[in-house]
Amino acid sequence: MGLFVERLKYELLGFSQRPSFKLNKTQAMLAEEVEENGYAYFPNFIDEDKLGSLIATIKLHFSEAREEFQYKGDTRHHGIERTVPEVSFFSSDTQLLDIGSKVMSRQLINLFTLGNYLISGNQGTSGGGWHRDSTHPQFKAMLYLTDVTELNGPLEIIPGTHKFSNLRRFNRKGLLPYNQQWLTEREIAAIENEHENRITVTGKAGTLILFESSTLHRGRPIESGERLALTNYYYPKNSNHEQILKNFGVA
Ligand SMILES: O=C(O)CCC(=O)C(=O)O
């Protein structure tokens, strides 16, 4: 019950703080899609020359083991923009920030960017199994730097599972307690049965995905090839940034 009240407070605070952002037509459309479905995507976010150079730089960065990398089936560097300046065009993109702030009804900042490199053959998946990042809404922007098909670890997401109305329904039907973050395949199947099926987000290198990461999601296990991606982690401007950075090991 405690979490229900917390979430209710969060929703109400959003209404009372609703900032006004001037979004262009495309931004407004993407924000609306994220609000409605929990995710949206946009192809060709960067041009091919820039992409080629970025891939080469990030692969080189990941080619040597480093203390700040985490290995969880993929190689992850939270805060990659602090050592790879070429990433900062994405980390500091103001249009993405405005879309996120609109979706979350509060001013956000991008606290850090994750670079992650997933290679087949290690039973790897980006981010572990099915989960929601938080029981509270959170905004992320992910950029595929390599082509992502069904085979090389696409994001999978169940539309609408971020909505408070659906969470209340899942809770009432005993499908998802408010405080549960990680879910088994069987629990996901029950939610899909009651609600709707997962979407697999495939896309060419340069595809941008915006998502509200309290929506149920996972990186599908990679079967072949590789997947290189960047993800911005946005938080409300007034949250405890020091603690969050510490949790992610960002110095
Ligand atoms: O990278 C992905 O496809 C999903 C990532 C994810 O689930 C996470 O990091 O929480």
Image: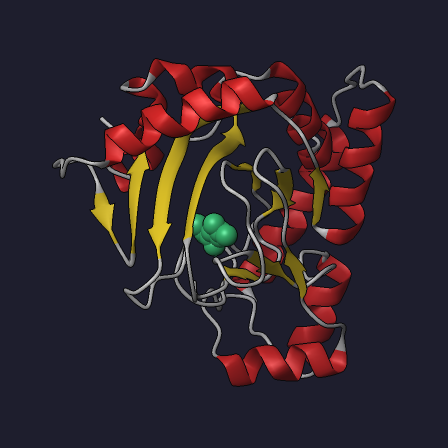
* Residue in the picture at 50% in, 41% down: 146
Can residue 11 be seen here? The reply is: yes
**Is 16 situated left or right of 186 in this image?**
right
Q: Nearer the viewer, residue 15 or 209?
A: 209
**Is 54 situated left or right of 76 in this image?**
right
What number of labels is visible?
0
Percent position (x, y) of residue 133? 48, 53
Up/down of 46 relative to 184, above or below: above
Quadrant where the N terminus is found in the figure: bottom right
**Is 102 situated left or right of 239 in this image?**
right
* Residue in the picture at 46% in, 30% down: 239
Up/down of 77 relative to 176, above or below: above
> What is the quadrant of residue 30 in the picture?
top right
Percent position (x, y) of residue 102? 73, 28
Can residue 79 be seen here? The reply is: no
* Residue in the picture at 56% in, 73% down: 177
Percent position (x, y) of residue 45? 64, 27
Percent position (x, y) of residue 129? 43, 67
Residue furthest right as drawn: 25
Q: Nearer the viewer, residue 23 or 58?
A: 58
